[in-house]
Image (tube, rainbow, N blue to C red):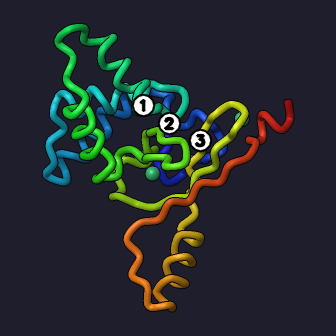
């Protein structure tokens, strides 16, 4: 398996090669960081990782219900699990489409990254570009603004759809 650092981000499905392996990697990261990946958190993470596209909140709730039947956890429980995964940087929320994607470098902490969102195939590609994030941060601070979070989402057409 290539290291997360060396992982190219050009594959729109880069998150989902191995959902079980991904959950295991997050589990290991949680142990290292003293966090608890409870069964519901692992379950929600697995659903997000297995989705081929960014997963909308209502789709996620549907999948939880489908998988677990009448014993399915209630929506607030699912949302709390999502909050945990977001807070610790294991998944990202795409605000402009209200959907979630697994982060493909789960060992790094919560981080801001630009996303490229294809409006044709609905894939989302995490752009590992610290420079863009740092530049915005520096510009904000130069104005005396104290930045806490960044949402950088670029909509358009991915290379594969553009070529089709
Ligand atoms: Zn990420
Ligand atoms: Zn596309």
Q: Earlier in the sequence, mark 2 or mark 1?
A: 2
Picture quarter containing residue 19? top left
In the drawing, what numbered circle is on residue 15? 2
Which residue shows up at 43% across the image and 45% down it? 103
- Position in image of residue 32 (x %, y %): 19, 51
Which residue shows up at 68% across the image and 40% down it? 118
Q: Earlier in the sequence, mark 3 or mark 2?
A: 2
Q: Distance between the residues labelled 3 and 2?
A: 10 Å
Q: How far apart are marks 3 and 1 (CA)?
A: 13 Å
In the drawing, does residue 129 fall left or right of residue 48?
right
Tell me: is circle 1 under 8 Å from ligand 1: no
Q: Which of marks 3 and 1 is nearer the N terminus?
A: 1
> Are the residues flagged by discs 3 and 1 in contact, CB closer than 8 Å?
no
Q: Is residue 90 above or below residue 19?
A: below
> Are the residues flagged by discs 3 and 2 in contact, CB closer than 8 Å?
no
- Position in image of residue 68 (x %, y %): 25, 12
In the drawing, does residue 141 fall left or right of residue 33?
right
Tell me: is circle 3 under 8 Å from ligand 2: no
In the drawing, what numbered circle is on residue 154? none
> Are the residues flagged by discs 2 and 1 in contact, CB closer than 8 Å?
yes
Q: Is mark 2 on a helix, strand or loop?
A: loop
Which quadrant: the C terminus? top right
- Residue that mark 1 sits on: 49
Neighbours of disc 3 within 10 Å: few (<14), some (14-19), many (20+): many
In the drawing, what numbered circle is on residue 124? 3
- Position in image of residue 130 (x %, y %): 53, 68
Q: In this view, does 89 lie above or below 38?
A: below
Which residue shows up at 32% across the image and 39% down it? 25
């Amino acid at each position: 398996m290539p290291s997360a650092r060396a992982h190219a981000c050009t594959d729109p499905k880069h998150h989902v090669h191995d959902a079980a392996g991904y959950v295991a990697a997050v589990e290991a990261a949680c142990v290292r960081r003293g966090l608890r990946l409870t069964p519901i958190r692992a379950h929600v993470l697995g659903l997000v990782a297995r989705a081929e596209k960014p997963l909308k909140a209502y789709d996620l709730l549907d999948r939880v219900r489908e998988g677990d039947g009448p014993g399915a956890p209630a929506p607030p429980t699912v949302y709390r699990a999502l909050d945990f995964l977001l807070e610790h940087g294991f998944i990202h929320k795409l605000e402009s489409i209200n959907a979630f994607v697994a982060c493909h470098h789960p060992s790094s902490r919560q981080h801001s990254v630009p996303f490229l969102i294809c409006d044709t195939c609905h894939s989302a590609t995490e752009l590992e570009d610290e420079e863009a994030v740092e530049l915005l941060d520096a510009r904000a601070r130069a104005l005396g603004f104290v930045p806490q979070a960044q949402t950088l989402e670029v909509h358009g057409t991915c290379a594969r759809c553009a070529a089709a």
